[in-house]
Image (cartoon, rainbow, N blue to C red):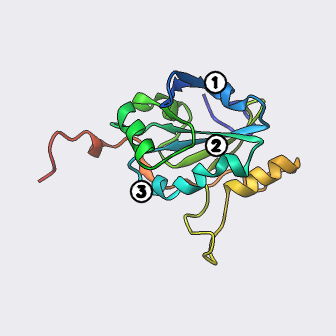
């Protein structure tokens, strides 16, 4: 299977740290679209976006949002404890083994996907260029995509390169430190 802009993304169902399990469709109920963020509780790049993700629902009431913890070795309980410790208010699902990340061709966190109500992929990549908004070199990628989508206009930049922490790495499973 190939993932293309304008193509349909597959349905997913994963355990929620809030209890039970959730589907992608459940985050689309009553919404015009959804942002899916592949996320890691230990990734320093993801930590930087905590305030952005916590405030997402207030900024975008018409767009659902969910983060998926897929990093190798991160347990359900670790993710739940991290969410409590960092006061994370956004929905978090756990992708044990990273199967959904693989299905979505995602190799690092954070990586975001903007999806329409009919599950068409509209944007994928980075949230921004990893500068702070007050930086003169700041360039947002996800926000302009959301604005264009909600305005019914074409999204100018439908894909950007992602950067961040690897979801799977040989270094995560080494039995002992390298000498």
Q: Is residue 102 left or right of residue 59?
A: left
Kindly report the distance in space between the C-alpha atoms of the residues bearing marks 3 and 1.
Answer: 29 Å
Q: CA distance from mark 2 to mark 3?
A: 20 Å
Which tag, 3 or 1, sits closer to the chain's start?
1
The residue under the point 54% across, 22% down is 21
Q: How many marks?
A: 3
Q: Which mark is residue 27?
A: none
Q: Give residue 175's position: percent from left, percent from top.
A: 17, 39
**Residue under label 2:** 113
Q: Quadrant of the N terminus?
A: top right
Badge 1 is on which residue? Answer: 11
The structure residue drawn at horizontal position 75% and vertical position 38%, both measured from the top left corner, is 33
Q: Badge 3: few (under 14), some or many (20 or more) residues near its Cα, within 10 Å?
A: few
Q: Residue 161, how many percent across, how many down? A: 58, 55
- Say which residue label 3 marks: 44
Q: In this orientation, does residue 34 appear? A: yes
Pick whichever of labels 2 and 3 is earlier in the sequence: 3
Quarter residue 147 falls in: bottom right
Q: Position of residue 138 (x, y in %)?
A: 63, 70
Mark 2: give few (<14), some (14-19) or many (20+) Cα within 10 Å: many
Q: Quadrant of residue 135?
A: bottom right
Q: Nearer the viewer, residue 165 or 13?
A: 13
Q: Quadrant of the C terminus?
A: bottom left
Question: What is the x, y in percent for residue 146?
Answer: 75, 50
Q: Residue furthest bottom?
A: 136
Query: Could you tell me which secondary element the residue under label 3 belongs to?
Result: helix
Q: Nearer the viewer, mark 2 or mark 3?
A: 3
Please state which of residues 90 and 168 is positioned toward the viewer in this rendering: 90
The local crowd at label 1, few if under 14, some if 14 to 19, many if 20 or more residues have their Cα within 10 Å, is few
Q: Residue furthest right?
A: 152
Q: Is residue 126 visible?
A: no
Q: CA distance from mark 1 to mark 2?
A: 14 Å
């Amino acid at each position: 299977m190939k993932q293309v802009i304008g193509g349909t993304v597959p349905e997913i169902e994963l355990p929620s740290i809030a209890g039970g399990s959730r589907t992608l469709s459940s985050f689309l109920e009553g919404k015009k679209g959804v942002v899916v963020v592949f996320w890691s509780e230990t990734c320093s790049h993801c930590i930087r976006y905590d305030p952005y993700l916590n405030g997402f629902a207030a900024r975008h009431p018409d767009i659902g949002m969910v983060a998926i913890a897929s990093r190798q070795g991160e347990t359900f309980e670790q993710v739940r404890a991290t969410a409590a410790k960092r006061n994370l208010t956004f929905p978090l699902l756990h992708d044990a083994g990273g199967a959904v990340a693989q299905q979505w061709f995602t190799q690092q966190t954070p990586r975001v996907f903007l999806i329409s109500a009919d599950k068409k992929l509209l944007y994928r990549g980075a949230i921004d260029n990893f500068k702070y908004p007050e930086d003169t070199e700041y360039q947002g990628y996800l926000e302009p995509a959301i604005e264009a989508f909600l305005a019914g206009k074409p999204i100018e930049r439908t894909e950007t390169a992602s950067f961040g922490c690897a979801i799977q790495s040989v270094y995560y499973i080494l039995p002992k430190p390298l000498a």
